[in-house]
């Protein structure tokens, strides 16, 4: 969890209207706009939350949380097709289902192609609010699209199993072991990764069930995790969401109006293969928060661990009323002459300036899976970070965090995965076609 690597997109906690069809109000989709350039996409570099809301085609900064009978929450639709896959730059939904599958022995390239074609066909219908043609259990029959997105990625082992070893991207080299990791292999990795987001839990669960049934005999479920974020419309105004530690979580996420955004998130050239152009890499980490220990700290101690005020997310040392987007002054001093933001504060150690400019686009979700045998909460963050190259993004940042971040004392990294996400499916084509037929 980092101030620059586990936070949500700036506007994701706002209203839920992603556009009611393939294009937004001005005839453009968010992903089409993002595909044209990495900077200058909003009205100005200082557009902040308001600018991000405008880019999403959302009305005014207020939310109508009514149901699918006419309100925006159920009828909001995210286009399935585009230059990039849905579920990367789109605001995080209220619910997520994450899962990974392993290919059956002997499936090979042809079997993988057939599965991806079937998944693409089902996902395109489900994200439009239509029932799947196969294995639709009618669980979501009376719901709208609910901002459903289906995002698919490929694990490193898939390339050998499918006879595609010569097309495995260099960026899929295994992540190094980090100090303090306590990873459970059974809850990480996998040949095929799926992220399913929706503003309704039944819609998300139903979509995963359809994909799982379509994969029967070809790929078996390896692991599954469910997460949640603030429901669109739950806040009176668009604000950055909070995690289970109560911290505003998402302030320093890269934004589309910033120069170099596309180069940070999407693959283009370098040593990555041509089939991955317009795609991305995803690092997944299941990070348990030691909430009993964290909640025993007084608020001022919590704030010093993070480096931000808990009440409004403003950096320590900022004047009253500054707000979470107030510039971070790492040289600011307190009344006693000590650093206002401690040397091991999370935002200091995670700052891009302290990591050679390394940055990622985060789309994290909270999880709470009951209690562990010792009675402590099995709860924390499902960390999702999209980037053009994990060797220049996640790896150097996490290496530094694991050795010098005061927040690490309250976290346990318990599962991990790295996946290559292909670009959006070509017109009339299927997810992964660029890899299998390029």
Image (cartoon, rainbow, N blue to C red):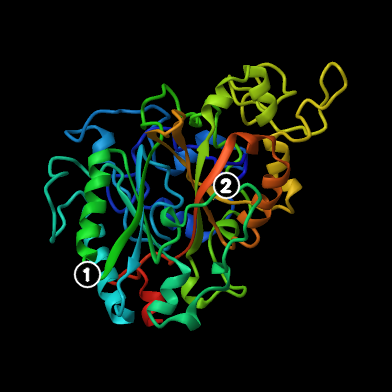
Kindly identify the residue that appears in the image at 55 percent across and 28 percent down: 247
Q: What's the residue at 59%, 22% (across, down)? A: 312
In the image, 184 versus 248, the foreground residue is 184
Give coordinates of residue 298: x percent, y percent: 63, 16
Q: Position of residue 183 (x, y in %)?
A: 52, 52
Horizontally, residue 385 falls left or right of residue 162, namely right
Q: Which mark is residue 217?
A: 1
Residue 390, horizontal then vertical, whole percent: 59, 60
Q: Earlier in the sequence, mark 2 or mark 1?
A: 1
Q: Which quarter of the rendering shows the N terminus?
A: top right
> Residue 201: x percent and y percent?
27, 39
Extreme front residue here?
374
Q: Is residue 253 above or below residue 176?
A: above
Task: State whether residue 24 is above or below residue 190.
Answer: above
Q: Residue at x 68, y 55 (%)?
A: 396
Q: Residue furthest right?
A: 337
Q: Secondary structure at mark 1?
A: loop
Q: Which residue is mark 2?
A: 257
Closest to the observer: 139 or 359? 139
Residue 277 in the figure: left or right of residue 105? right
Q: Residues within 10 Å of mark 2 (few under 14, many from 20)?
A: many
Q: Is residue 47 visible?
A: no
Give the distance between the C-alpha atoms of the residues marked 2 and 1, in whole angstroms.
44 Å
Q: Residue 27 vs residue 389: left or right? A: left
Q: Is residue 249 visible?
A: yes
């Amino acid at each position: 969890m980092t101030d620059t690597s586990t936070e949500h997109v700036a506007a994701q906690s706002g209203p839920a209207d992603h556009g009611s069809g393939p294009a937004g109000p001005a005839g453009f989709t968010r992903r089409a706009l993002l595909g044209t350039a990495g900077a200058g996409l909003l009205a100005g570099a200082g557009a902040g939350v308001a600018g991000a809301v405008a880019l999403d085609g959302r009305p005014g900064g207020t939310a109508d949380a009514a149901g699918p009978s006419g309100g925006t929450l159920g009828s909001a639709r995210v286009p399935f097709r585009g230059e990039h896959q849905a579920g990367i730059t789109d605001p995080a939904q209220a619910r997520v289902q994450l899962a990974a599958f392993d290919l059956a022995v002997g499936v090979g390239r042809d079997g993988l192609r057939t599965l991806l074609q079937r998944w693409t066909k089902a996902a395109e219908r489900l994200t439009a609010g239509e029932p799947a043609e196969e294995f639709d259990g009618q669980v979501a029959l009376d719901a709208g699209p609910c901002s459903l997105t289906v995002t698919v990625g490929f694990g490193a082992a898939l390339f050998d199993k499918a006879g595609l070893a010569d097309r495995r991207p260099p960026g899929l080299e295994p992540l190094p072991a980090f100090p303090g990791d306590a990873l459970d292999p059974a809850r990480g990795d996998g040949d095929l990764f799926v992220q399913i987001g929706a503003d309704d839990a039944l819609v998300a669960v139903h979509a995963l069930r359809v994909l799982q049934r379509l994969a029967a005999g070809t790929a078996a479920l390896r692991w599954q995790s469910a997460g949640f974020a603030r429901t669109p419309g739950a806040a009176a105004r668009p604000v950055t969401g909070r995690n289970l530690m109560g911290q505003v979580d998402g302030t320093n996420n890269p934004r589309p109006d910033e120069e170099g955004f596309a180069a940070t998130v999407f693959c283009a050239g370098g040593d990555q293969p041509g089939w991955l152009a317009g795609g991305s890499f995803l690092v997944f980490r299941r990070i348990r928060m030691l909430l009993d220990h964290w909640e025993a700290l007084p608020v001022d101690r919590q704030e010093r661990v993070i480096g931000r005020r808990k009440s409004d997310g403003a950096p320590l040392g900022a004047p009253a009323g500054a707000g979470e987007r107030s510039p971070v002054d790492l040289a600011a001093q307190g009344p006693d002459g000590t650093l206002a933001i401690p040397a091991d504060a999370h935002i200091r150690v995670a700052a891009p300036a302290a990591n050679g400019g390394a940055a990622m686009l985060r789309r994290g979700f909270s999880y709470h899976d009951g209690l562990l045998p010792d009675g402590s909460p099995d709860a924390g963050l499902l960390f999702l970070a999209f980037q053009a190259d994990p060797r220049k993004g996640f790896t150097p940042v996490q290496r530094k965090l694991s050795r010098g971040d005061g927040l690490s004392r309250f976290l346990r990294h318990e599962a991990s995965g790295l996946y290559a996400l292909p670009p959006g499916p070509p017109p009339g084509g299927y997810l992964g076609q660029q890899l299998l037929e390029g």
